[in-house]
Amino acid sequence: MNIQIFGTKKSADTRKAERFFKERGIKFQFIDLTEKGFSKGELRSVAQSVGGLDALIDNETKNRDLAALISCLVPEQKEEKLFEHPEIIKQPVVRNGKQASVGYVPDVWKSWQ
């Protein structure tokens, strides 16, 4: 497995995802969204895997107005806003090759093993 966890250190769900993989002895790479973020190819691959850009938007974020605005944009604009405001992306985003998940979903991760 080639696990990548995209999130922030402040996200409780991201820390729970890291703990999930550590407890199972699975190596992973952590990518801090506030420091590095996604490349365009990574974002498109993840969005395709999880059902589109809308699945990446965290509607429970502190900045709900921005999340609502991004939800109303056309896909090209939506992608650009997600690059500009990675804090709007639901965390963690976990990738395993072409597979991806959004949020804390250990049942999905178990199926990858």
Image (spheres, rainbow, N blue to C red):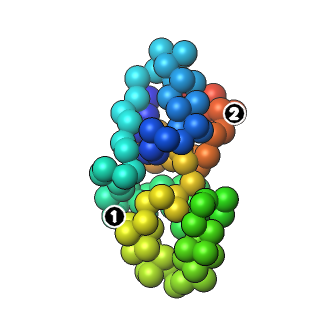
Nearer to me, 13 or 106: 13
Q: Amino acid at mark 2?
A: Asp
> Residue 5: percent from the left, percent from the top?
45, 39
Task: Residue at 44% x, 81% y: name it.
Answer: 77
Q: Which numbered marker is on residue 107?
A: 2
The residue wearing badge 1 is 40
- Can residue 79 be seen at all in this image of the molecule? yes
Q: Earlier in the sequence, mark 2 or mark 1?
A: 1
Instruction: Check disc 2: other Cα within 10 Å, few if <14, some if 14-19, many if 20+.
Output: few
Residue 27, quarter of the rendered image: top left
Task: Residue at 39% x, 75% y: name it.
Answer: 80
Q: Name the residue at the front extreme.
A: 62
Q: Amino acid at mark 1?
A: Lys
Q: Which numbered marker is on residue 25?
A: none
Nearer to me, 35 or 79: 35
Mark 2 falls on what kind of element? helix
Compared with 88, 5 (above or below) is: above
- Can residue 55 be seen at all in this image of the molecule? no
Task: Residue at 38% x, 36% y: name it.
Answer: 30
> Residue 21: percent from the left, percent from the top?
52, 24
> Residue 74: percent from the left, percent from the top?
52, 84
- Is 65 left or right of 78, judged from the image as shown? right
Mark 1 falls on what kind of element? helix
Compared with 2, 66 (above or below) is: below
Compared with 1, 68 (above or below) is: below
